[in-house]
Amino acid sequence: MIQKTILITGAGSGIGRATAERLSKLEHVQLILIGRRMEALQETLMTCASPERHRCLAFDVRIANEWKSMIAAHQDHFQSLYAIFANAGVGGENHYGAEDRWDEIISTNLTGTYVTIMECMPFLQQKRHAYRHVVITSSCLARFGVPRYTAYCAAKEGLLGLTKALAVEHAHSGLLVNAICPGWVETEMAQAGIKKLADFSGKSYETAYSEQMGYVPTGKMSQPSEIAAMVDFLISEQQVSMTGQGIDINNGSFMI
């Protein structure tokens, strides 16, 4: 059986870590775990099955030249590229002015995803596998607006546009491109978001958490492992018909 390489960005924590842990259990799979901090990537690696099969690469996914250097140094691992989980991102508010985080949030979430896919595209186009996959982490905030999250909402909505454009462009070659739109997921990013809401409203973390879950029909956050299971399905050999889709996995916080 042909070796499959699956690349995960934002692999150092949260959804990326949970996905790495799950996918590492598949046969004939090697993972390329990418993030900014090697220490966090190594921690993820230790949660994976057969950690010796996988590689950790620490660099900034927004920078094309860093991609080129890493690919050149590890080209053997990219030759069997089967799937990309473009998951790297940052959250939080932004406010117009001298300390506006607009550029940081847009460049990390949107530009970083674009650069990731484009730098890896030559390997996906080698067609070593009949179907190859790209899964992009968008957000339920691509579906509705949130005050003070203008950059994050714009970036995540932009990722859905990127998903559709790439899906149409590459469908004929067997490259399937989809996005996931999680709602609240039990991660450090979500906890930081709840804390920010609590601080803004002068309430306790517990009260802010309860209020936010009150807006969610199921009344709960997803676990990272639930999102990992969806990614596993979207890149599986059984999934050969879905492309250009934004998959809402948000406990009912947005319904079409």
Image (spheres, rainbow, N blue to C red):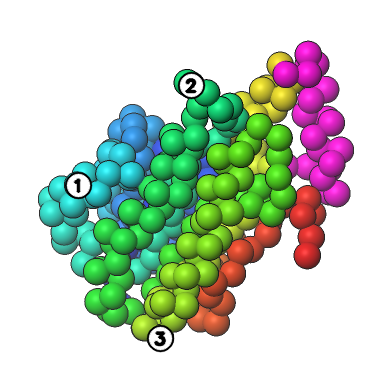
Task: Kindly report the distance in space between the C-alpha atoms of the residues bearing marks 1 and 3.
Answer: 29 Å
Q: Which residue is mark 3?
A: 172
Q: Secondary structure at mark 2?
A: loop
Observer-nearest of 138 and 17: 138
Q: Is residue 243 above or below residue 103?
A: below
Quarter placement of the C terminus: bottom right
What amino acid is at disc 3? His
Residue 224 visible within the image: no
Q: Is residue 49 left or right of residue 220?
A: left
- Residue 203 sits inside the magenta stretch: yes
Q: Secondary structure at mark 3?
A: helix
Query: x, y percentage for residue 41?
Result: 36, 37
Q: Which residue shows up at 44% across the image and 36% down it?
A: 103
Q: Residue furthest left?
A: 73
**Quadrant hosting residue 203:** top right
Label located before the other in sequence (2 or 1): 1
Q: Which residue is mark 1?
A: 65
Task: Kindly report the distance in space between the C-alpha atoms of the residues bearing marks 3 and 2.
Answer: 44 Å
